[in-house]
Image (cartoon, rainbow, N blue to C red):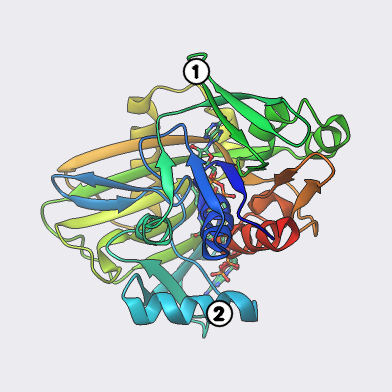
Amino acid sequence: MSSLRIAVVGAGLAGVSAASALREDDHQVFVFDKSRGCGGRLSSKRTPMGGFDLGAQYFTARDSRFRHALQHWLDSGWVAEWTPRLYCYDDTGLHESPDDQQRFVGLPGMSALPRQLLADVTLTSQTHIERLHPVEPGQWMLEDKTGVTHGPFDRVVVAVPAPQAVVLLEPAPTLQQTVAQISMSPTWTLAVAFDQPLATSVDACFVRGGPLDWVSRNSSKPGRHGSDSWVVHSTPAWAADHLEASPESVTAHLLEALSEVLGTALPEPACTHVHRWLLARPDDKRNWGALAAPELGLYVCGDWCLDGRVENAWLSGQQTARTLV
Ligand code: FAD
Ligand code: NAI
């Protein structure tokens, strides 16, 4: 196939995965994202107290194709294995919960992986694509929120969370209806750093019951520098109940819950940061892999085509690239 001009809307791992595969296939790929950089829910925040992973905390690798790519990322130093002292907190309290599962993190933060994968691709950031316009047969223009148009492109890949994809898929009503079936739930993230390390051996904890879902000692991950830093995630239900709560109130609630899980009073934090993920995870699993209206040159991918995990976002992007070529 001769070289195509392909637009990818969304620079999360699904979009990055599709873009890098299509670029390797010698197509001209142009990625657009509404945020300042790439990575989407693989997000890392730099602070004077060190970096924090605000979204995905780690990833596991079960599919052989993903494991193959992972080996290259390990060899390149983009990711490393994380072996936390794992705990579980439930109605019996806090207890160790070791397992044999391998878990991996980006270096020095989770956003490093999409950044590395996108190195050879043109990224136009801070560009919120609002509409896709079919122009000449088989050609597309992209209109952003400021009214500027980009293109023309031979193909468009939409790689954004399902509720955001629905808006863009107006020119493909059947595809739009399919994607509209997907709902996604929120999560509140609290990142907190302390001047002195907390007196606990917990590196990570799966939480069952109460407002929290997950606790991790961010600074226990490889390649992280700085002070004793922690990331906690609320459950989707707690986030839904506190969607409009103030950052101060969310911080206070989640710090209290962290103290309860760890079974220790917390000192005054050196810094805190909260982030609200409105579309954190899909509510249901699908086995779509990726979706497409090939007759229109329109392709759709994202974790929600499978299940809300890093590995699935990458697999969905790969499937889109395979279908497109
Ligand atoms: P996204 O990462 O959401 O990327 C979509 C991109 O599209 C974003 O960059 C967004 O800015 C952009 N965008 C949206 N609309 C537009 C538009 N109109 N124009 C331009 N750009 C647009 N997974 C794991 O495997 N392990 C974990 O530990 C884990 N923990 C998680 C914790 C949290 C709090 C969250 C939120 C997610 C977690 N996940 C975890 C899930 C994982 O992060 C996702 O499955 C994966 O990152 C999704 O990638 P994606 O490319 O499909 O979507
Ligand atoms: P995984 O295999 O480590 O965990 C999957 C699930 O198994 C965990 O959520 C936990 O409930 C359970 N589990 C695993 N090991 C355990 C142990 N040692 N002790 C007790 N329970 C254990 O990772 P996988 O399958 O790659 O899942 C990704 C993770 O990402 C999940 O934890 C999921 O909850 C999280 N996630 C969070 C989102 C959010 O919005 N907060 C969004 C999407 C994923």
Cβ at disc 1 under 8 Å from ligand 1: no
Q: Earlier in the sequence, mark 2 or mark 1?
A: 2
SS of the residue at dot 2?
helix
Quadrant of residue 251 in the image? top left
Q: Which mark is residue 78?
A: none
Q: What's the amino acid at mark 1?
A: Val
- Return the residue found at the far front: 2
Q: Nearer the viewer, mark 2 or mark 1?
A: 1
Above or below, comparing residue 221 to residue 309 in the picture: below
Q: CA distance from mark 2 to mark 1?
A: 40 Å
Left or right of residue 210, residue 113 in this image? left
Q: Residue at x 50, y 26 (%)?
A: 128
Q: Position of residue 7 (x, y in %)?
A: 58, 41
Q: Which mark is residue 148?
A: 1
In terms of depth relative to the viewer, which is nearer, 236 or 322? 322
Looking at the rendering, in which quadrant would you find the N terminus?
bottom right
Q: What's the amino acid at mark 2?
A: Arg
- Note whether residue 188 is visible: yes
Circle 2 residue: 67
In terms of depth relative to the viewer, which is nearer, 207 or 189? 189
Q: Residues within 10 Å of mark 1 (few under 14, many from 20)?
A: few
- Return the residue found at the far top: 147
